[in-house]
Image (cartoon, rainbow, N blue to C red):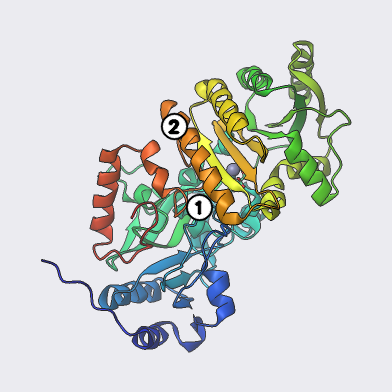
Amino acid sequence: MASAPQITAPETILSELSAIVGEDKLRTDQDTLHSHGRDWTKAHEPAPLAVVFPRTTEEVQAVVKLANALHFAIVPSGGRTGLSGGAVAASGEVVVSFDYMNHISDFNPVDRTVVCQAGVITETLQTFAEEHGLYYPVDFASAGSSQIGGNISTNAGGIKVLRWGMTRDWVAGLKVVTGAGEILELNRGLLKNNAGYDLRQLFVGAEGTLGLITEATMQLTRQPSNLTAFVLGVENFDGIMKLFNRFQSEMDLTAFEFFSEQALQKVVAHSGLQRPFESTCPYYALLEFECLNDEVAEQAMALFEACVEEGWVLDGVMSQSIEQLKNLWRLREDISETISQWTPYKNDISTIISRVPDFLEAVENLVNAEYPDFEIIWFGHIGDGNLHLNILKPDNLDKTDFFEKCGKVSIGVFEIVQRYQGSVSAEHGVGLLKKQYLGYSRSAEEVALMRQIKQVFDPNGVMNPGKIFD
Ligand SMILES: O=C(O)CC[C@@H](O)C(=O)O
Ligand SMILES: [Zn+2]
């Protein structure tokens, strides 16, 4: 029978950590424990033992080896913009922050790759690419604070997935420290590499449960030209899907997003932005394309007019400048942050595109029947089959009661997800918040294999325990 791991005195752990990272890179003050002990989810109270700020892969390795030797748990911490509690440290863990591992190096213009330490901020990489005449296409509202290591660990998606895919598609190589403390260099930037299993892909989206990503070789691409957006007002979800099919069949779109009138009202009130046009419509689609020349512009306008004639579009506007493009995008991108003041209960669900219309109808019927008193904010990446369903907490309802009531309805939502063979977490990951629902989109066999994989990379269970599954 295996004996229980010995508990090590906190003072011993702290002094050993200090010996690795240096006294100034070990923090135990309440402010740091609080700020670095959680992500954007507010359901758990942070309570880590300490936060360490390593500067090299070797220091990270030493911390992981120490965790194995002294039996403490590690929680990785990037920009902490996650929405599933993947970076929450609520039980005396040691948080490993990548804030000081934020250097970009080894730009290779021929391969169009660049090496980033895990703590490089997404926007810094985007700006670096632009300064070199290239483009890093994975983009989302939190790009100003999210870090590349966290993006990879959660396989972050965002607003341009339709055209450019998710973070996974841009990871050409990874340097990781496994849960057992080995340093692995995975794929090394190769475009073609069929020499056995692609271990790099296991670390993408693993939420730090297999090891810690310390460095990534990121792929860049050509810059898009003259991105132009329409915001179109529509009557119902059915109209949105018809619009999507029509545009998608005739043009290459770079994004196809949607949001509801309620979402728009909240963003306009919060930001002072203008409404896109005077008419009030139940839903809005935001679609973007590269307006390469006059011919494309004319084609886009003709499509818009055809959709109006069909009765699918009630009103619309097309951006005429970068400034207008940015402002139209803000109507969509600012939603999540704007509604955060209502302590929303979040759903991040998906199915394949062809099933989206029926899936939407089923979810909408359930939600309308079950949440009569709660305000519902719909938005999301409809072109990716990914819907964000946020339920806002009424002021007079206690947080615990609210989450409990929403959790009950969630079961119905996830049953629909299961019926449509969709995902209970399309892009935000499982973390702590979705783990009890994992079985609605992954089979028991799959989860059992995931556990075995974890065991291989992290035999002592030191890496982000309790995330994805118990
Ligand atoms: O807050 C949300 O529910 C979604 C956040 C993000 O994924 C977005 O698409 O804006
Ligand atoms: Zn999203």
Distance, label 1 to label 2, CA atoms, is 20 Å
- Whether residue 138 is visible to the viewer of this picture, yes or no, is no
Where residue 54 appears, as percent x and y from the top left, is 46, 76
Give the vertical position of 405 relative to 253 (above or below).
below
Label 1 Cα neighbours within 10 Å, binned few <14 / some 14-19 / many ≥20: many
Query: Which residue is farthest top?
Result: 310
Report which residue position mark 1 lands on. 84
Question: What percent of the width, then of the height, locates residue 279?
Answer: 86, 28
Of 46 and 285, nearer the camera is: 46
Q: Is residue 233 left or right of residue 81?
A: right
What secondary structure is marked by label 1?
loop
Say if residue 289 shows up in the picture: yes
Q: Residue at label 2?
A: 415
- Give the quarter of the figure containing the C terminus: bottom left
Above/below status of 189 relative to 105: above
List the single residue furthest toward the right. 278
Please identify the quadrant where the N terminus is shown: bottom left
Which amino acid type is shown beneath numbered disc 2?
Glu
Q: Residue at x 31, y 50 (%)?
A: 199
